[in-house]
Amino acid sequence: MERGRLLYIGTYTKPEDHVRGHAEGIYVYRFDEQTGGIEYLSTASDIVNPSYLTVHPFKPLLYAVSEINDFQGGETGAVVSYRVDQGSGRFTMLNAVKSRGTMPCHVSVDREGRYVFTANYISGSIASFRIQPDGSLSDAVCSVQRVGKSVNIERQEGPHTHAVVPDPSNRYILVPDLGTDELAVYALNREDGSLVQDRRTLRTTPGSGPRHIAFHKCNRFLYLINELASTITAITCSGENFVLTPFRTVSALPEDFTGSSAGAAVRVHPSGKFLYASNRGHDSVSWFAIDGNTGELTPAGWVSTRGRTPRDIAVSSGGRFLLAANQDSDTVVTFRVDEHTGSLEFMGSAEIPSPVCLYLP
């Protein structure tokens, strides 16, 4: 297989309090955009618990969190930079820097390719880093410690930042905080990478536990998946002032489901017609039809991921395939996407240990 894009798979490499990990690092596969097949290329085994990954928008660079709390003897995780050979898929580590908080769980790059951001889940902080000319990272140029709590005394005793996502204009960074039930908004200073909390921060339903977001391709809507409530909140992003207005919340689970489940990943299909969400417990991917004019979601179906704990999902750039990572049954599953209905047809699975992040640029 020579055609296709690189598929990067983040994993857990060692057990922690909240996970069972036994992988070797970041796995790289070649993804065939015509057939949906994947071919193993290489493994970066010089990182512990690379649980979330991202790539530079126009350079062969990859950034990963190391979800730990004891990097270089301090109470912090790490963010690691790599150069990637696009032909062989092999990695060259550039450097690793302190994440300025414990158990970092998400990483992103701004749309101009100048800064990297990370969310530190346990400590409830976020940080930004300058990308150096060679692709390596500076020490943190800004670190923000969030405060607050919410109604779930076991999961929301303090802030737990779960993502750091640049908005389409690259002026704001959006931070779902599971611990405080907020979608926090920070203004990004593009000159120095500093972050300042903005008045646009949204409060979500108490106990919902905001986790991840996905923008619609028109940039007028975004969708927030709430981990604890297993719901998806649809939000409008309007005007030059980027006003956020939630207008609908729907369940990510079937009405007749009575077990325990937690929302995980949310993705919008490249066509803008469908939204997908993964459910850990129900162990499924749900999909919704999107009204392109209003952003409204209509539940359309659910499909089993044929494994346990689908922590992440990814949709191929052409929209023909969806992949799901079953964290606790060590498989990555491929589905064919029906372009008319958004429904998912199982195609096959690959055995990959402790997969928790799928990045398919």
Image (cartoon, helix red, strand yellow):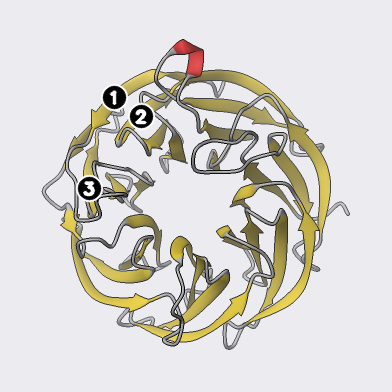
Local secondary structure at mark 3: strand
Q: Is residue 344 left or right of residue 107?
A: right
Q: Is residue 239 visible?
A: no
Q: Is residue 226 above or below residue 144?
A: below
Q: Which three-letter amino acid code belongs to the residue tagged 3? A: Val
Q: Which three-letter amino acid code belongs to the residue tagged 2? A: Ser
**Tag 2–tag 1 contact (CB < 8 Å):** yes
Query: Which is nearer the eye, 243 or 150?
Result: 150
Dot label at residue 185: 3
Q: Position of residue 75 (x, y in %)?
A: 39, 19
**Tag 3–tag 1 contact (CB < 8 Å):** no
Identify residue for label 1. 142
Q: Position of residue 66 (x, y in %)?
A: 53, 30
Identify residue for label 2. 128
Local secondary structure at mark 1: strand
Residue pictured at 28% horizontal, 62% vertical: 208
